[in-house]
Image (spheres, coloured by chain):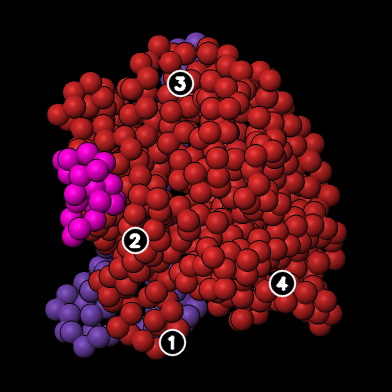
Chain colours: A red, B purple
Amino acid sequence: MNAIALAAIGLFIFVIGYRFYSKFVAEKIYRLDPNYVTPAHRFKDGVDFVPTNKFVLWGHHFTSVAGAAPILGPAIAVYWGWLPAVLWVVLGTVFAAGVHDFGTLVVSVRNKGQSMGTLANKLVGQRAKILFLFIILILVLMVNAVFAWVIANLFVTFPSSVLPVFIQIPLAIWIGHAVYKKNAKMLVPSLIALAVMYLVAVLAAEYQVLQIDLVRYFGGEDGAGLFGLGAISSAFFIWIIILMIYVYIASTLPVWKLLQPRDFINSHQLVVGLGILYLGLLFTNPEVTAPMTNSAATDKSWFPLLFITIACGAISGFHGLVSSGTSSKQLNKETDARFVGYFGAVGEGVLALISIIAVITFFPTADAFKEAYNSFGAASGGGLGNFVQGASQLATGLGIPVDIAATIVSIIVVSFAATTLDTSVRLMRYIISELGSEYKLPALEKTHVATTIAVVSSAALVLIPEGPNGFGSGGYLLWPLFGTSNQLLAGINLLLISVWLKRLGRNYLITLIPMIFLMFMTLYAMIIQVFTEWAFWNESSSTLLFVFGAIILGFALWISITAVSALLNKNLPKLDPNE
Amino acid sequence: MIDKMKQLIAYYEEVLSMPHRQEIARELRNEDDLFLLLLYSEMIGIPNPVYYYTLELYPHMIEKFHDWHLRMGMDKSPLSGIRCC
């Protein structure tokens, strides 16, 4: 099949979904009112509550939710062939992610711009709030571990990307300083920073001396590394430790010093990345070489694992945190919620779709694809590398040489992953502090204590699983757990929207059905993985995965019970939408 | 055409600067809050040599004062002299 045609079909369904389905949801279910006074106007304070143009708000919302996850998930999930992955991304975005992101935004707007955690308490009760907090804690822990692995993996596979990524740090600090202290405009400095990064990338791709290749320093793949570990294993270990030291510092600095200016540079990178991929697709006009469904994929069934392998890009609970945390406080008119929320989800779907296409057009033949994706383990470990190579092949359509394109694409993915890592370590630190104050443990409220716990637990988690290249290289084994916790968060968000709709006396099936679907898939996937793979009585047992899988399974059951009792509870009083 | 490009660039810049503007506003507000606290330093037992003059600020700050005490976690005005709520 022609890849442009595939992309066009996907994009067409997104357009139809936005044009018709979101309109139906906006008018009949959420019943948006153009005259409703949004929190941005009602509590206008110039800081958190600021009425914002809907296009600007969408841009901000989209850049906050798009990251490395909608790239990595699809790159793994094409293991079962491209059709299941494309269908799940397209239909998931239209029927699940759209209503989820849109719904969390609307519920929050109708409740003084409060976040979903606070609303859990109000709509369902105190227990739901604590459940919410614990699921976020597990989610951020998984994010820290998986994304640290993602970065270490790209540094080991594409050593030319190391220097440009580290150059970004002083550049970001310089921009932060210029903007904050001298009130400079940020567009030009951040474009200069991007140009410098890419220039270094071009040089690093050309000259080996600029490539920080730890494996080569240890004497190649067979060389001896540290503490009797192999060279690759040692490289992973060193990169993960360096990353953890970096995030410790980055997540305790004020946000304007490093995190925000790096975000400006990364927003450009999102535009550059999407541009390279879609324009490259147009110019190279490739054929899809991967099989539609992979009959050789027998070691793990697509049902239900597909639905937790692609989380971001089809539906992601994390978006609910952004919708209800910041976007809802800045919505100018309630009717803008459809564009910001639903179209934000579509933006993420567009990114996931092109990630799939980059991978499925990369291999010269279907056999080469099957060779690279010969097991689920190989797909998980190698998916990201395949994406980078596939994307650089698309970039050749724009006249960019392959090795330079590969460096630039890996820089883009690393930058996304690093921002996510920074933010989630920071978030984990806040949650640990909040739990400390909840359970009267004042020591946990101290910044450095909370950050140390966050960083050390994440580092331990990513180093424990052993991949084919030894210690530290198995971080991807945690990917299904990341997907599951993200889906659970989406599940609880959808539950809250459903309860809200029910208490308003409206039809809540449009959120209940995706919720039941998600909860069923995550429960089913966890039961299969925990009992037939990770438990100690199996050949492939793993204590770490078993423990985390069991905890997540427990949470999934807990949410399901909470959902049933909340939806059947007739004592919850009716809500007034204008209250 | 050039106008359209300018519009696009202005839009792009606004998207980029949105979180930053928010952060700067937050820092400024924190500084303001600290300043207000200094004005009411007697409340926390620190003598205020200029309290006589700060009284003159009263009409200018009555509205801000209300937001301030709400942000500081006090539902009602902590000073009986200023009855904003």
Image check: A51 left or right of A94? Answer: left
Instruction: Answer with the quarter of the image where residue A403 lies.
Output: top left
Residue A367's place in the image compared with A213, above or below, is above
- Secondary structure under badge 3? helix
Instruction: Answer with the quarter of the image where residue A436 lies.
Output: bottom left
Q: Which residue is mark 4?
A: A560
User: Label 3 to label 2, Cα distance in Å?
Assistant: 32 Å
Quadrant where the N terminus of chain A is found in the figure: top right
User: Label 1 to label 4, Cα distance in Å?
Assistant: 26 Å
Q: Which residue is mark 2?
A: A463
Image check: A124 left or right of A399? Answer: right
Of the two numbered discs 3 and 1 in the rendering, the one whose residue sits closer to the viewer: 3
Of callouts 1 and 2, which one flags the residue occurring earlier in the amino acid sequence? 1
Of residues A17 and A467, the one nearer the viewer is A467
User: Label 1 to label 2, Cα distance in Å?
Assistant: 30 Å
Of callouts 1 and 4, which one flags the residue occurring earlier in the amino acid sequence? 1
Q: What's the chain of the residue with tag 4? A: A
Residue depicted at 17% across the width and 40% down the height: A219
Q: Which residue is mark 3?
A: A393
Q: Residues within 10 Å of mark 3 (few under 14, many from 20)?
A: many
The region drawn magenta spans: A217-236
Residue depicted at 18% across the width and 55% down the height: A226
- Secondary structure under badge 4? helix
